[in-house]
Image (cartoon, rainbow, N blue to C red):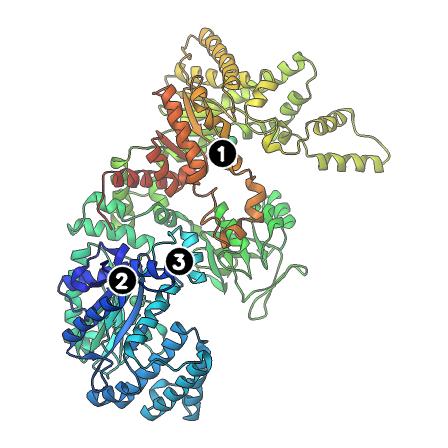
Amino acid sequence: MKKFVYGLSEGNKDMKDLLGGKGANLAEMHNMGLPVPPSFTITTDACKAYLEQGSEPEELSAQIDEYIAKIEDENGKKLGDPSDPLLVSVRSGAKFSMPGMMETVLNIGLNDASVVGLSKVTGNDRFAWDSYRRLLQMFGKTVLDIEGEKFEDVMDEAKSAKGTTSDLDLDAADFARIVERFKGIIKDETGKDFPQDSKEQLLEAMRAVFRSWNSERAILYRRQERIPADLGTAVNVCSMVFGNLGMESGTGVAFTRDPASGQQGVYGDYLQNAQGEDVVAGIRNTMSLADMERVDKAAYDELMGIMSTLEAHYKDLCDIEFTVQNKKLWMLQTRVGKRTAEAAFKIACQLVDEGKISEAEALQRVTGDQLVNLMFPKFDAKAEKKRIARGMNASPGAAVGQICFSSPDAVLAVNEGKKVILVRRETNPDDLSGMMAAQGILTSRGGKTSHAAVVARGMGKTCVCGAEELDIDVRARTMTLKDGTVLRAGAVISIDGTTGEVYTGEVPVVDPPVVQYFEGTLSEADIAADELVRAVDRIMKIADKTRRLRVRSNADTPEDAARARRFGAQGIGLCRTEHMFLGDRRPLVERLILAESDEEKAAALGSLAPLQKADFVEILQAMDGLPVTIRLLDPPLHEFLPSQVEMAAAHAVAQAKGHDLEADQKKIMAAVERMHEQNPMLGLRGVRLGLVIRGLFEMQARAILEAAAERRQAGGDPKPEIMIPLVGAVQELEIMRDAITKVAAQVSAETGVDLTDVPIGTMIELPRAAITAGEIAEAAEFFSFGTNDLTQTTWGFSRDDVEGSFFSNYIERGIFGVSPFETLDQGGVGRLVKLAAEAGRQTRPELHLGVCGEHGGDPQSIHFFDTVGLDYVSCSPFRVPVARLEAGRSSGTAEGSDFR
Ligand code: ADP
Ligand code: MG
Ligand code: MG
C-alpha cells in the first residue's frame, strides 16, 4: 500500500518534492524540538493521483483517519467533538511557493453542535461564533468558489446595523445571526447544506487544494517560471491554535535578519488578539516585534531563542509565522526568506564570518541578477526632489530627460543631442524607435507584462509603467498631474525604474558604490567603510578563484576596452568594425560601393586602410597582453548608404524645384536601388561581403596585422584574433582564410614581425554552420557563438520585428517565460551550440570556443555555456562582473554545493 500521509516526525526539510515546502519545514521544526501544533501532511503524490483520476486514491481516506486519530490523541480532543472539538486548518503547500494556490481554511471541525461546545470550554461565546462564521466564509469562498463579496456584504450590513465599521464591535449574537445567513448563502449557491461532518469538511477542503494546482493563475505562473506542471501540491492539516482568545494571545511574522539591509536584529510584526492573516491584512495597527517583549516577555524570549536556533540550523535568514495562545508560543511556518540584493551579499558574508557557512556556500547565496541590481545608476539620495507620481517599477534604473510624446519627436530630439523620456499612455510596436532613442519610458497604463515593460526590460531601458495618476494627452502633447499642473513636451522629468517613482525636474544621478568599486575609484578606506562593497569585493574574489570559464568583453572602442578591463575582462571576445565605417568615413565607403573600376576600388580601400589600422592600434594597446577577437565587416553595405526613402524624397524635392539630382547623387540613388534587399538580415552580409567585394576583408586583415606589428615593435604584446562572420559552409571560410593567410605572410615579410600565427576563426551563427561545425573546424582555429543571430536564424524571426510586436503576447500566454534573446533557449538554440562545440572539438581538440552574443552576460545562459565546456563568455563591459560571478557559481555547483 502506498503511503500518502506523513506525520511530522516522518518528514524533514529535504522532502519538499513529496511534502511541499511548508510541510517539509514544519516536519523539520518539529524534529528540532520546536513547538509545532500536531499536524500531518498529505503528499503531492495524492494530489497527482487525484488530478489524474478525478478522485483521490482509495486508501487515502483510511490513512487520513489514522493520522487524525494520532493528532486527536496528542491534543486530547476529538475532531468535531460536540462538547470539546479539535479544530484544524487545511493549508496548501507546493514545492515552490506559488501564486494562485488555494488559501488556507481555518477552524475546520466546527458545526452547529461543536460551536456550542467550543464556546462552553473556552467560556468565550464571541470567539466561538466568530470562528464558525470565519469557517463558513473561508469554506464558502475558497472551497465552494462562492463570490467572496456575498459574505462581505452580510458582514457590512451587520456592522452598519450596529453603527460601526469594526469587527470588534460585533458580539456573539451578531455572529450567530451571521452564521445563519452564511449557511443560507451556501445553500442558495450550491444547492447543498454546509457539511456538518468534520471529515467531509476536511476532505472537501483537501480536494479544493488539489484542484487549485490547476487554477488559471497557477498554470500561467508555472509556465512562465518553467515550474514543471506535474509536481502537484501537498496539503497540510494542522491542529488549530488560537491567537484570538484575548490580549494574552496573538499572531505574528518575523525575520531572523532584516531582509532589506541584512542587518542582524529583531524584525517582525505582532498583533494581539488576532488570527491568521490579520497581521498582514492591515485591519489594525500591528506592533513591532520589539514591543512584543513588553506585552509578553516569556513568549518573546522563547521566540528569540527559536529564531537563533533556526538560523543556526538552516544557516540562513529564515522567515517565520507564529501564534501565541494564552501566552504559549506556537510555530506555524518557516522557510529560508526572500531578501533584497543588498541583503543577500551582506548576509552571505556575515554567515561566513559567523562560521555558519563556507566561502563556497556564500557564493551560492547571491546571484548575478542581484549584482546587476546593485549596479544600476541611482538617483542621488541626498538630492532634493519633488515626486509627481508613482507607477510600476517595470525596468530598473534612473533616467532623466525631456518629455516627448511620440516616437518621431523622441528620435528627432535625440538626433539634436537631447536626452528624452518617452511618455505614452501605453506603447505599441510603432514606438520602438522612440523607445530605443529615449533614456527611459513612462506610461500611464499597463502592468509589468505590458508592451512597454517587456520591451524596455529586453533593451535594459529604465521604465515606469501604469502611473495612473498621470493624465497623458498625446495629441495635445500634455501630461496633467493629479494636482492639475500641466507639463508640456520639453519639460524635464526624472523616472526611477527601481522604485516606480516619477519626479519633476532633473534629479542628479550617481553611480552606485558598487560600480565605483568596479571602476576602481574607491579608496581602500572607502571600501572598508562600506559593508556592501566589502561583501561584493569578497564574493567576487571567491568567484574568480572558483570559476573555470574565462570572461571577455564585447568592446568596439578603446574606452570600452579599458572599462571592460577595469571590470575584470580577460580579453575582448567581439570587437565589431562596422562603426569604424560611419561618420566622416562614410564618403569613403560610398566611394568603395560606387567604384566601377578595380583602380577606383583599390583607391577607396587604400584610403580606408590607414584609418582602420589606427583604430586597431588603440584597441590592442588598451588590451595589451590579452586576446582581442576582431570581427571583419558584418552588416550589409547599403546600411552605409542613405535609405531608399531618403533618396526618393531628395529626388522629388529636386524635381519639384525643376532641376535634377547631381550626377553623383544619381549614382548613389542607382546603387541604393540596386542594392536594396527584401530581407537584409538574410542578404549580402558577413563572409558573403568579403567574398563579393574583393579586397575588403583583405584590407581589414592587413590593418589588423599591421597594427599588431606596430604594437609589437613598440614593445607591446598584442594578441589579435581575426574572426569571419556568418559562415555557413567551410568553403566560404577556406577562401577567406587563404586570402588572409597570404596577407599575414606579406605583412610579416614587410615588417619583420612574425604574424603568421595570428588565429583565424569564425562565428557560428547559422544553423548550417552549427550542423556542419565538424567540417568548419578544419579551417577555423576558434569558434565564437553569435547567439543573437543564431537565435534569430534558428527561430526564423528578426529581433527588431518581433520583440516590439508580439513578444509581450507570447510572454503573457506563457509561450516563453522570458525572451530567448535574454536567456538562451537551451532546448533549441542551445542544442545547436552543444552539437557544434562537440563536433568542432572532435575535428580539432584544441579548438578554442567562446560566445559573444548577449547571452554571454545572462546568468542562466552562462551556466549552460559552462556545462557545454566553452572556454569563455564575452559580454558588454558592464556585464563583466555578473559573468565572473555566475561563472564562479556555475563551477561551484559542479563541485557539489549542498545549499538548499
Ligand atoms: P500561506 O501559504 O499563505 O502563508 P498559511 O497556510 O501559512 O498560508 O496560513 C496563513 C495563516 O493562517 C498563517 O500564517 C497562520 O497565521 C494561520 N494559520 C494556519 N494554520 C493555522 C493553525 N493551525 N492555527 C492557527 N493559525 C493558523
Ligand atoms: Mg504562511
Ligand atoms: Mg551576427
Q: Residue at x 78, y 27 (%)?
A: 662
Asked if one can make out residue 170 in the rendered structure from this viewpoint, the answer is no
In which quadrant is the N terminus drawn? bottom left
Q: Are marks 2 and 1 in contact (CB under 8 Å)?
A: no
* Label 2 CB sits under 8 Å from any ligand 1 atom: yes
Q: Position of residue 329 (x, y in %)?
A: 18, 73
Q: Residues within 10 Å of mark 1 (few under 14, many from 20)?
A: many
Q: Find numbered disc 2 in the image and state the secondary structure of the residue it sits on.
A: helix
Q: Separation of disc 1 and disc 3 at Cα?
A: 46 Å
Q: Position of residue 553 (x, y in %)?
A: 41, 33
Q: Is residue 313 left or right of residue 544?
A: left
Does the residue tagged 1 have its C-beta within 8 Å of any atom of ligand 3?
no
Q: How many marks?
A: 3
Q: On the image, which quarter does residue 876 sit in?
A: top left
Between residues 351 and 562, which one lies in front from this camera angle?
351
Residue placed under numbered mark 1 in the picture: 790
Q: Residue 632: x percent and y percent?
A: 51, 24
Crowd tier of the residue under label 2, counting other residues whose Cα lies within 10 Å: few below 14, some 14–19, many 20 or above: many
The residue pinned by badge 3 equals 382
Q: Say what amino acid the circle numbered 1 marks.
A: Leu
> Height in image: 506 above or below 170?
above
In this rendered view, identify the residue nearer to me: 718 or 125: 125
Question: The disc labelled 2 sits on which kind of residue?
Answer: Lys
Give the mark nearest the N terminus, 1 or 3: 3
Q: Is residue 39 above or below residue 643?
A: below
How packed mark 3 is, by other alpha carbons closer than 10 Å (few <14, some 14-19, many 20 or more), is few
Three-letter residue code for mark 3: Lys
Quadrant containing ligand 1 reads bottom left
